[in-house]
Amino acid sequence: MKLVGIVGSNAEVSYNRLLMEFVAKHFGDLFELEVLEIKDVPLFNQSDDQTNSKEVQYLNKKIMDADGVIISTPEHNHTIPAGLKSVIEWLSFKIHPLDAKPVMVIGASYYDQGTSRAQLHLRQILDSPGVNAHVFPGNEFLLGKVKEAFDTDNNIKDQRTVDYLESCLRKFMRFVNVVGILDEPQPAKAPEPEDLYATGKIDTTIENVDMNADDWVEQAAEAVNAVEGKTYVKLDRGILTVDQLNYFLASMPMELTYADSNNQFLYYNQTAPAEEMLASRNPSQVGNPLAKCHPEKAYKNVGWVLQQLRSGATDAVRVHVPTHGPDKYVVHNYQAMHDENGNYAGVNEYILDFKPIIDWYLKQTGQELVGGTDGVSGASAKEDKAVDGVSGASEKETETVAVDSVSGASENA
């Protein structure tokens, strides 16, 4: 557990600093505690905004990165020091690192009552809107007669006091864990399963044509009077003939595939026979629902990729497929497509051999690949994982699911 301890005094000599340093040293086996100072933080003045100063941002980052906070406060005139109050003002003005952060209050004082009044005020401040800390209730540690409390090695003399401090700290650790559970984001609602059979209908669905027909393209084109050849098509920023569009897409140095938001395979740029492609496609597949493009055992993984793209969890899923030989570095990219209103419009799968680009870049810049990888194939110097030759999915279960969303898919979850 990682905690930060804020010394609530800007004095050069402070018993509250000694107390915090004792906690860090003596209880280092329970948690990691980094002691933070406030003596260099400027006095709060909203007319002279210092939120972005290095002193304020340093505290902000340290608190944000910590699991919990301990503040050791002196007592000045029955309340906390002005310097500590000023720091909390900065940390609740435009930034709010203490919001929902578990905070424990301790303190040391010259007098019998320790810092009881200051601690009460500090708890109220930490509870206030804009600060919104989760203040550790009860378990007040009030170190009184502090001039007599430490020995020459700056250790607390009285063992009962040390034991009570340890008891409070252990309870605070449990409190930090409980707050962490309470503040965990609720699990997202499970996405609807993907309809890989494309039984639904969207605005662009061509009805009354069998999706499974080998000549779907020809039947669908006839049904909607699709233009072809030298007929011009007005695009968002250009006018091309259908032939020019085909030339343009065929010239792309990658294999392009489009499946719409209804999970129907609608297009690929046919530039080579299926057996020569990085991911084989054949003309009779076009028009099929995605279920027909994959073995049933792969449906779960195909659906997972589509859910990630449809839900907006990510705009792209990328998978390196190292089974094409050492002379290639092939990556399958699944890119979410959206209409002008931002609605999901399907997946653009593009498959690219990056090696020619990498080789060209290295030649142009005079650089070389270094490190623990094979510069040609990208294979790890460690023992290679077994890989599904179609999808590039490791046989071991991984968090990232490798799927060819149209022509093939990983068999593993």
Image (cartoon, grey):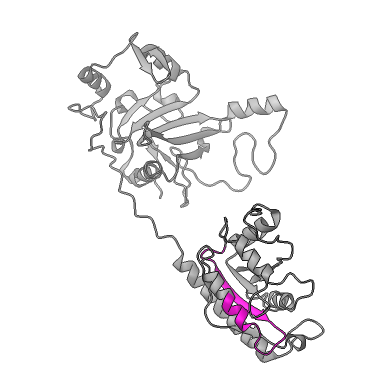
Q: What stretch is highlighted in magenta?
A: 98-121
Question: Where on the picture, by quarter, is residue 194?
Answer: top left
**Hey, which quadrant is residue 257 in on the image?**
top left
Magenta stretch holds residue 273: no
Residue 328 sits above or below residue 3 on the image: above
Closer to the camera in the image, 31 or 183: 183
- Residue name at image x 62 percent, y 59 percent: 60
Side of 26 relative to 195 (left or right): right
x, y percent for residue 77: 67, 79
Vertical placement of 152 versus 374: above or below? below
* Figure check: 244 above or below 197: above
Q: In this view, does 347 lie to the left or right of 211?
A: right
Residue at (34, 55) in percent of width and height = 189
- Residue 234 seen anywhere in this rendered image of the structure: yes
Task: Find the residue positioned furthest to the top.
Answer: 230
* Viewport quadrant of the N terminus: bottom right
Magenta stretch encompasses residue 112: yes
Image coordinates for residue 216, horizontal then vertical, percent: 25, 24
* Relative to 26, 202 lies left or right: left
351 or 85, nearer to the observer: 85
Which residue ends up furthest to the front in the rendered image? 47
Question: Residue 256, position in %: x, y?
Answer: 42, 27
Viewer can see residue 33: no
- Furthest toward the left, the residue is 208
Q: x, y (%) of residue 17?
A: 73, 74
Position of residue 284 in the picture relative to residue 14 (left or right): left
